[in-house]
Image (spheres, rainbow, N blue to C red):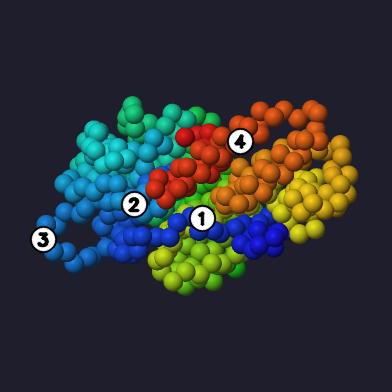
């Protein structure tokens, strides 16, 4: 039984495991292609699909792209025709509003059902010089937007609810065009990290001072790095990953004071996406390959038959999730575990078989019974599979019968929470929400 539960686990280093499991079979396979943009909302939300404006595609009829909104299980919830100007980027706010950025700096906002809400402008200078690239980021006050114009200037809004446009003025005047950039929000200020052929520059919005970091300070001498292809910042804004033109991946702290690792991916095809999976690993995706790289340079490689997108993986046949196995789940299910929760689970299983071995396992738990009960409840919260949830909650219920000090309220509340999570994960709703994300919705 335990072997089946850990069959989709893959080690990444000594004590870290990742797992990949299917959320839903994919029902809109034709939309998953290089010719389309697929943008997934946070917290298991909707998926927006439209034609990729950077790709040349033969079209018939009106040359205005359609925007389709799907649930994560593939149910079409809305579609509408884009009647604005040149579309630069689609994205989602933290309130699951669809954000559409035009090349003239206009930002159009739709709700999750495709109903138009309102719009705002990034300013006249952006309108005159045109947007060449845009980014979304999370700030302390909400969802932020930044745009890069054709004259190498960056303008940003920290909160789309109250859009106050600010210019990042201290952009390096030397080194040529900005090749790659990202935004970091920490200590109640927004920093811009950008690169050109002269290296990395970190610009603080508050004092507008640029810190220059040459490539030689980040990479070993034998790696002749000349440009950054992509950047990714972790969700807690403490770690950064850089993917270079040589195929090397750099991972370190956000201030570049500590380097975790430098890994050569040995991939020749162009990188399609890069993102942090928690804080322990970075996921890079190419046309048909996903690579998970840990902070100590260990790797896991997944191969797909078609294009993929992000950490929630959209392949040609399914919608999957790649995640770090939670520590509490590792302790319970890993082979030869001596954790009290693992013993409690085995005692519950032996009790179901009416075996006297249940007493022997309960003797091993002893004074740590309350902690074992809580661990089984916590483990159930991180599982998507109904049967695994039942297995762990049954073990917690069994342990409660032997404890005089455990508070039953935690068990009862978790039962209610799991009912909610299982309901919204059902394909009819199609929101694959995790327990960690649940409090933020």
- Residue 275: horizontal and vertical position, in percent? 50, 53
Query: What residue did someone put label 2 on?
Result: 75
User: Mark 3 vs mark 2: which is more N-terminal?
Assistant: 3
Q: Is residue 279 visible?
A: no
How much space separates mark 4 and mark 1, taking CA atoms? 23 Å
Toward the viewer: 17 or 198? 17
- Residue 52: horizontal and vertical position, in percent? 28, 58
User: Mark 2 vs mark 1: which is more N-terminal?
Assistant: 2
127, above or below 63, in the image:
above
- Residue 143: horizontal and vertical position, in percent? 40, 35
- Residue 235: horizontal and vertical position, in percent? 53, 43
Mark 4 vs mark 1: in front: 4
Toward the viewer: 222 or 20? 20
Residue at disc 1, secondary structure: strand
| Left or right: residue 327 compared with residue 103 | right
Label 4 environment density (alpha carbons within 10 Å; few <14, some 14–19, many ≥20): some
Query: What residue did someone put label 1 on?
Result: 321
Toward the viewer: 399 or 84? 399
């Amino acid at each position: 039984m335990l072997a089946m539960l850990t069959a989709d686990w893959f080690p990444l280093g000594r004590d870290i495991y990742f797992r990949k499991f299917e959320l839903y079979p994919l029902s809109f396979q034709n939309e998953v292609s290089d010719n389309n943009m697929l943008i997934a909302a946070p917290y298991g939300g909707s998926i927006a699909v439209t034609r990729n404006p950077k790709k040349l595609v033969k079209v018939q009829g009106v040359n205005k792209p359609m925007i389709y909104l799907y649930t994560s299980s593939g149910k079409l919830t809305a579609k509408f025709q884009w009647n604005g100007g040149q579309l630069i980027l689609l994205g989602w706010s933290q309130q699951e509003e669809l954000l559409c950025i035009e090349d003239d700096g206009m930002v159009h906002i739709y709700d999750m059902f495709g109903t138009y809400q309102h719009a705002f402008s990034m300013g006249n200078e952006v309108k005159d010089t045109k947007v060449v690239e845009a980014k979304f980021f999370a700030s302390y006050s909400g969802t932020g937007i930044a745009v890069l114009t054709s004259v190498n200037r960056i303008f940003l809004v920290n909160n789309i609810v109250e859009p106050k446009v600010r210019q990042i003025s201290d952009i390096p005047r030397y080194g040529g065009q900005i090749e790659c950039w990202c935004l970091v929000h920490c200590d109640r200020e927004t920093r811009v990290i950008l690169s050109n052929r002269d290296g990395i520059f970190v610009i603080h919005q508050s004092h507008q001072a640029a810190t220059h970091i040459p490539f030689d300070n980040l990479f070993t001498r034998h790696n002749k790095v000349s440009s950054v292809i992509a950047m990714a910042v972790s969700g807690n804004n403490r770690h950064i990953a850089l993917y270079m033109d040589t195929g090397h991946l750099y991972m370190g702290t956000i201030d570049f004071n500590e380097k975790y690792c430098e890994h050569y991916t040995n991939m020749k095809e162009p990188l399609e996406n890069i993102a942090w999976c928690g804080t322990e690993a970075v996921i890079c995706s190419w046309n048909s390959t996903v690579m998970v790289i840990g902070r100590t340079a260990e790797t896991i490689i997944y191969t797909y038959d078609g294009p993929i997108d992000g950490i929630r993986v959209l392949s040609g046949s399914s919608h999957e999730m790649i995640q770090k196995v939670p520590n509490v789940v590792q302790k319970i299910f890993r082979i030869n575990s001596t954790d009290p929760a693992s013993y409690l689970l085995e005692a519950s299983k032996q009790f179901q078989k009416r075996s006297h071995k249940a007493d022997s396992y309960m003797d091993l738990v002893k004074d740590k019974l309350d902690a074992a009960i809580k661990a089984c409840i916590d483990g159930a919260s991180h599982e998507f599979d109904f049967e695994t949830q039942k297995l762990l909650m049954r073990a917690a219920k069994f342990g409660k019968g032997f404890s005089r000090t455990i508070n039953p309220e935690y068990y009862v509340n978790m039962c209610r929470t799991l009912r909610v999570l299982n309901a919204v994960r059902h394909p009819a709703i199609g929101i694959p929400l995790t327990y960690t994300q649940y409090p933020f919705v």
